[in-house]
Amino acid sequence: MTGAITARITPRLVRWARERARATHETIAKRLKVEPHQVASWEHGEARPTFRQAHELARCLSVPFGYLYLSSPPIQKTPLADLRTVGNRTVKTLSPEFRDTLNDVIMKQQWYREYLQEEGRSRLEFIGKSSVEDDVKQVAAEIQTALGLDDNLRRETSGWEDFLSALVRHCESSGILVFRNGVVGNNVHRPLSVREFRGFALSDELAPVIFVNTQDSKTAQIFTLVHEAVHLWVGKSGISNADLRTRTSAPMNATERFCNRLAAEILIPETGFFENWNNSGAIEQNVQQISRVYRVSSSVALRRAYELNVLGYAEYLRWLKREEARWRRVLAKKPEGGNFLATLLSRNSSTLTRVLVEGTLEGRVLSRDAARLLGVKVTLLNKIGEKLAGAA
């Protein structure tokens, strides 16, 4: 492009940003409407993009424009424990999508924490109340009571999705901000990977947070939600990705092992499991019965059967593969719907959304701050307020 001013960006930073985004030369070239060899030449220092191309390149790779001028890649540390494993191997890499999601949630948590401090709120007593050395059934009973997770709640809910929504409301009522999202912010072009993580917890005595990756099935989200709630009870922040294929004897972080065992006991109490499992009946019918009674996925029901030594590992794995294949077929036929208010409340926590929107209407929160945190335009805040008032 003759006469255009070029950007003196650092070639190695272009390559770092591209590899960080897991993008190819071809993908970037298509977005910037250039040839792939031009992108490669920017990485090798053989040519420079124009300022417009450099700005678009940074946007395409989801990095601040200034990063492309650094002499070396920035050191990116994650402010919470990475507890994810695949088999027996600890996962080391974190995608830009995860990092941007985490930073967004932390920003919202910090704002809400300051808001609660100004309100003079007291610390939440259940944060860090338990430890991984405690009795699983005793702690499970405490959490079930605190979250109102009992047979009445299961009977009152019509299905898994209704049960999940009710459980989220109970978590929020107890003081936990629950964020459920399957993309970065509101950007549907940046989906989150279930293979990378299913959820994370940010333990805090005033503003604890649970994040659930909604790219997962609704019933799998129920297990993730409860698993992350246990993280808060033991006061341990962390990124999780429970692998149902793992043997119970496999090496695992002590916190994750405890959270998995506790989440299973909370969702399917051992006593109740054996009351509903008929040893003389077919496995499929038993799994359906457990799933129906306890509002969990068939995969979680199978896992519980394996953990309680009702199924051997080989048999469990065979049935698990069948159920996973069936779920993929079901999910393929049921695309997510689009309700603006429901999506906003889910992605940003219903508690936080209401505090922000109602705060702007009362003059206690700046409109630009509320809009920035919710990822919407300022002009939409009044409409959101009207919808919230109508839904109350």
Image (cartoon, helix red, strand yellow):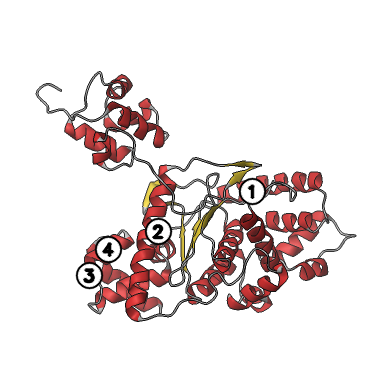
- In the displayed structure image, the side of residue 373 where residue 324 appears, left or right: right
Q: CA distance from mark 2 to mark 3?
A: 19 Å
Does 57 appear above or below 120? above
Whichever of callouts 2 and 4 sits on the residue coming sooner in the sequence is: 2
Which residue corresponds to mark 3? Answer: 366
Q: Are marks 3 and 1 in contact (CB under 8 Å)?
A: no
> What's the residue at 37%, 30% (across, down)?
27
Circle 2 residues within 10 Å: few <14, some 14–19, many ≥20: many
Q: CA distance from mark 3 to mark 4?
A: 9 Å
Q: Are marks 4 and 1 in contact (CB under 8 Å)?
A: no
Which residue type does callout 2 highlight?
A: Val
Which residue type does callout 1 highlight?
A: Asp
Which residue type does callout 4 highlight?
A: Ala
Q: CA distance from mark 4 to mark 1?
A: 37 Å
Which residue corresponds to mark 4? Answer: 371
x, y percentage for residue 116?
37, 75
Whichever of callouts 4 and 1 sits on the residue coming sooner in the sequence is: 1
Does 176 appear above or below 101? below
Whichever of callouts 3 and 4 sits on the residue coming sooner in the sequence is: 3
The mark found on residue 243 in the picture is: 1
Question: Which numbered mark, 2 or 4, is in the foreground of this view?
Answer: 2
Whichever of callouts 2 and 3 sits on the residue coming sooner in the sequence is: 2
Q: CA distance from mark 2 to mark 4?
A: 15 Å
- Which quarter of the image is occupied by the C terminus? bottom left
x, y percentage for residue 88?
66, 42
Q: Residue furthest right?
A: 280
x, y percentage for residue 312?
82, 49
Whichever of callouts 3 and 1 sits on the residue coming sooner in the sequence is: 1
> What's the residue at 76%, 56% (across, down)?
307
Quadrant in which residue 148 is drawn: bottom right
